[in-house]
Image: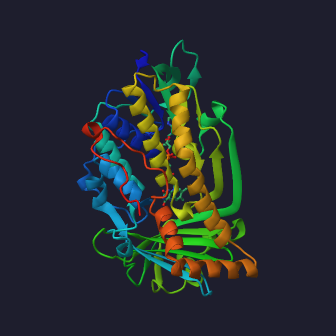
Amino acid sequence: MTPVETDLIIAGGGLAGASLALAVSRLVPELRVTVVENHPLAPDAAPDDYQPSYDARSTALAWGSRLIFEQLGLWPALSEHATPIRHIHVSDRGRFGATRLHAEDHRQDALGYVADNRWMGLCLVAALRETPVRWLAPAEVRGLVPAPTGVAVTVRREGRDQVVTGRCLVVADGGRSGLRETLGFRTRTEDYGQNALIANVSTSEPHRFTAYERFDESGPMALLPHGSPTRAGHQSALVWTLDDRNLAEVLALPDDDKCRRLQERFGWRLGRFTRIGACSHYPLKLVTVDEPVRPGVALIGNAAHALHPVAGQGFNLALRGLMTLVEQFRRAVDQGRDIGELSVLAAYQRQHRQDWLKTVYFSDSLIRLFGPAPAPLAGARDAGLVGLDLLPPAKRWFVRQAMGLGGRRPFFGNAGRTGREVYHDDR
Ligand SMILES: Cc1cc2nc3c(=O)[nH]c(=O)nc-3n(C[C@H](O)[C@H](O)[C@H](O)COP(=O)(O)OP(=O)(O)OC[C@H]3O[C@@H](n4cnc5c(N)ncnc54)[C@H](O)[C@@H]3O)c2cc1C
């Protein structure tokens, strides 16, 4: 197979890799981009044909992510099937503390949105088809090979190896990143000793566009409004944290009993649980990479960090990170520098690090503060929740983190090229 010459090679066309490809094509159009993706590309389905399935897996998008997708021109399509989160209710089961956040108190339409992963993928691929971004799919990046200048990767496609050369390789191959290990990046893993059970559920009461975060002695649980963006329906997306023993027990139950068990854990705020869809589950780990860059190579998305899903921050953090990387690419191109230079990639790492640390801290402290706890700590967290409800600055901090506005603001100063800032809220 003939070698492919490009500028930016993206290994993995999942949510992070495809978003990066779109952002580069919009904001640094001088760069030639090649995405290598293991799975075949989604068929050319027009997004208006979309039929959400009951069991669709979804992602909570923070308000800040909406602003990024607006800048990339993707929000009008995405929003067709993005359910707004207008209220967040955080509580501790059977205890006093609870806090409520309302979008209108912060002069916003929504605190965030819930969108199906498949829908986001379709919108991204449909938008990318209109750009010069090149896809090699199905194809697998197998590793780096020595190159006199820049980077060269081996790609396995149709049973044969092909070399793709470029200036920079971005590894976006997900949480079980094989490439990260192959390339020798060191990871730190902290096992929460818990699992996330994911399913969609129906309830007798409508969700009223409310996301519930509920904590008790066995860990956190989240229920996110799911379905129509305009009509408050009866379906929610469930993230239920369970230890190994309880997970095995719940999975073995018939659906009616699963609903009853869920009812005991969650209570009656959404009325009766009437249906639970297909369940999937993931072991919960905090995986981080201290140094996500080296000359010619950068990690993004789950390859760089995997967080506890209950706080709904993983993809939102990934999106802010990749925008920071694109900002550095823009700067390098403007200054006539190589996008694979270590100083370019190190600037991405430096600037994203604060956001990364804050988000990891936010997600991790939610789990530790509100996870299984002895009575005195449970009392302290009740006080925390009440305090959060009463103290405007604390609440504002919480809201800004939940809305994805707590991090640094990637800034594209060249208005002629990109229009405006990614973030505008600075209260
Ligand atoms: C249960 C759960 C719930 C979550 N909920 C939320 C939420 O509400 N909000 C939020 O912000 N985040 C959430 N997250 C996190 C979010 O799902 C991830 O951050 C996001 O999916 C990361 O996308 P990614 O592109 O990095 O990885 P992936 O989606 O895993 O994509 C990686 C891609 O790389 C491809 N690939 C792998 N190896 C290779 C190779 N060698 N060559 C070529 N291609 C390759 C794969 O085929 C895949 O398409 C949740 C995560 C979990 C597990």
Q: Is residue 378 above or below residue 407?
A: below
**Total of numbered circles in the picture?**
0
- Which one is in front, 157 or 83? 83
Residue drawn at x 38%, y 48% is 121
Image position of 427 (left or right of 90): left
Rendering coords of residue 296 (x, y %): 53, 26
Rendering coords of residue 359 (x, y %): 56, 56
In the picture, the quarter occupied by the N terminus is top left
The figure's colour scheme reads: rainbow
Q: Is residue 14 above or below residue 253?
A: above
| Residue 23 occupies quadrant | top left
Asked whether residue 291 is in view, the answer is yes
Asked whether residue 43 is in view, the answer is no
| Residue 381 occupies quadrant | bottom right
Residue drawn at x 55%, y 82% is 98
Rendering coords of residue 301 (x, y %): 52, 45
Image position of 131 (left or right of 180): left
- Which one is in front, 57 or 422? 422
Q: Is residue 423 above or below residue 240?
A: above
- Which one is in front, 49 or 232? 232
- Which one is in front, 44 or 384? 384
Rendering coords of residue 78 (x, y %): 31, 55
Q: Residue furthest top?
A: 148
| Residue 333 occupies quadrant | top left
In the picture, the quarter occupied by the C terminus is bottom left
Residue drawn at x 48%, y 38% is 12
